[in-house]
Image (cartoon, helix red, strand yellow):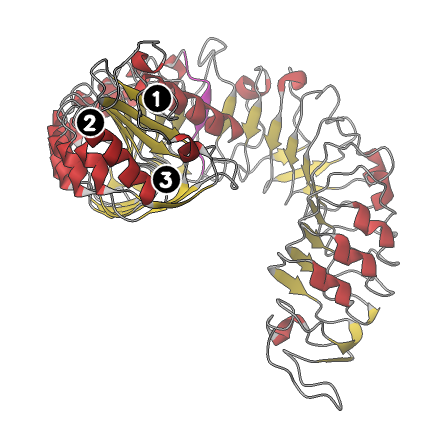
Amino acid sequence: MQILVWVFEVLFISSLVGVFPLSLAETTSPGVCSEADRAALLAFKAKIVKDTTGILSSWIGRDCCGGDWEGVQCNPAGRVTTLALQGPVKDSSMYMKGTLSSSLGSLPFLQVLVISGMKLITGPIPDSFSKLTRLTQLVLEDNSLRGNIPSGLGLLSHLQTLSLAGNHLKGPVPPSLGNLRNLEMINLGRNSLSGPIPDSLKNLHLLQSFDLSFNSLSGFIPEFIGQFRNITFIDLSNNQLSAHLPISMFNLVSLSYLSLSHNQLTGTIPEQVGNLKSLTSLSLSSNKFIGHIPASISRLQNLWSLNLSRNGFSDPLPDVSNRGIPSLLSIDLSFNNLSLGTVPKWITDRQLSDVNLAGCKLRGSLPRFTRPDSLSSIDLSNNFLTGSISTFFTKMTSLQKVKLSNNLLKFDLSELKVPDGISSIDLHSNQVCGSLSSILNNRTSSFLEVIDVSNNLISGTIPEFSEGLNLKELNIGSNKIAGQIPSSISNLIELERLDVSRNLITGTIPMSLGRLANLHWLDLSINRLTGRIPTSLLGIKFMRHASFRANRLCGEIPQGRPYNIFPASAYAHNLCLCGKPMLPCRGKKQETSQ
């Protein structure tokens, strides 16, 4: 999945290369800006009540075209042609808060309007934008815009790029957008749009990138999609689209990326899928497809990512020769109706980076890969694999994530020799025994972020934690672990989830647990813990779930959020816990929630 996300970002960024015309880089000497344009820009600035990006602080003086007004470009006549304000999406401290002023519709020479990544710009897209008839690029993504997409945007006949992704827009895709015959890229993803894909979009013959993902669109994928001869990128994933795949789609010989995952699509994959000779990434996961995976997939010479997981595909798999799918790097066939028995040789003998075969009814020993050094992620969970693990990781020098949970593996943790660069190990629900000290010690890699060995036969005690570990998730629940929770747990400063439930743990809850500022999930239930719940836990501000159920705890529950508003079941079956949400402590009046 990491590869799929990466390719999406690369292709999406590539599709925006044309967002900024050459004028942004040109060093022309425009005239003094039009007073009317300056007034329109200042009216926009007035609607922004907070700007932590600092961009608008440069909008001072009378000449908005002199180069000092950040994000503003003009033509030689002093008319504003470009307004490009981009915030860093991944930095939550950088944003603009306010609304879009309708005054921007009074910039008649505007060709490029980009206001993206500002996070807290809300309100509707002004109807006045329909007057910006010279616009070629309109990008308003990753803000908090609300309301419907104005049908007036269909009047912007020169528009080549339209991206309104990552907002809170609702309602239908306006049929008027079908008037934008020069449109090359449309991205309305990550909103709350509903209704069908309008038939009018069949007029967008120049379309190269089509993204309506992460909405609530319904109906079927229209047959006219096969008319987009220049299209290279289609993402309709995470909607409610249904019915069969249109056969016309398989005429798109330039199509490079196709994601239709997380819909309600039915039927089979037609043999014509082999016609998509430019395809590099195909994701049809989480639909209702049935039948066999067509052998014509072997003809996809450029395909490097194939995700057909969570459907109803059945045996047999196509017999892929050594020359079939030669570029394949990532494959996911998880959770279908496949009974593979063993991993096919055309998978084990390739130089793959990601292999996901969860729930494929694999049996016997763990598979051996011919090129183990290329693997970065393996998921063989929910199968019937047996035996030991001692040599499985040999030469897997690039491995980052491994998931072998819900199998019949039987081994001692001392046999586990994982690569130094691994970040996630999931072995839950097997027959693993031994002591945690075999994997948690002073040699544990700082790259390791996730350990899940729950529901096994692990015994011994919880080891001391040295500094420098970067664990974010530690799940050791449902084992036979005894002893106490060491106070050195506070060294796990990155920890977000801790589950030690259903063990034989004794002693008190260490005060040092309250130093784990990032913790938001804590489960200490069904152990033999005694003493009080330390008030130091009130220092953890982001706790969303905690359970202390079925121990031998006593005393007052910490009286502060969220502990005094968790359900009473989080504290049930202890010796004598009291205070909200339980009964008041003796001799003490119950206080209102803080």
Are dots 3 and 2 in contact, CB under 8 Å? no
Residues drawn in magenta: 302-309
Q: In whole angstroms, how far apart are the C-alphas of marks 1 and 2?
A: 21 Å
**In this figure, which residue is indicated by the disc labeled 1?**
16
Name which quarter of the figure residue 356 lies in: top right
Query: In the rendered view, would you say 248 is above or below 285?
Result: above
**In this figure, which residue is indicated by the disc labeled 3?**
166
User: Which is nearer the eye, 338 or 554?
Assistant: 554
Q: Which mark is residue 225?
A: 2
Quick one: SS at disc 2? helix
Task: Name the amino acid type tagged 2.
Answer: Ile
Query: In the rendered view, would you say 22 is above or below 571?
Result: above
Q: Earlier in the sequence, mark 1 or mark 2?
A: 1
Q: Residues within 10 Å of mark 3 (few under 14, many from 20)?
A: many
Task: Name the amino acid type tagged 3.
Answer: Gly
Name which quarter of the figure residue 64 lies in: top left
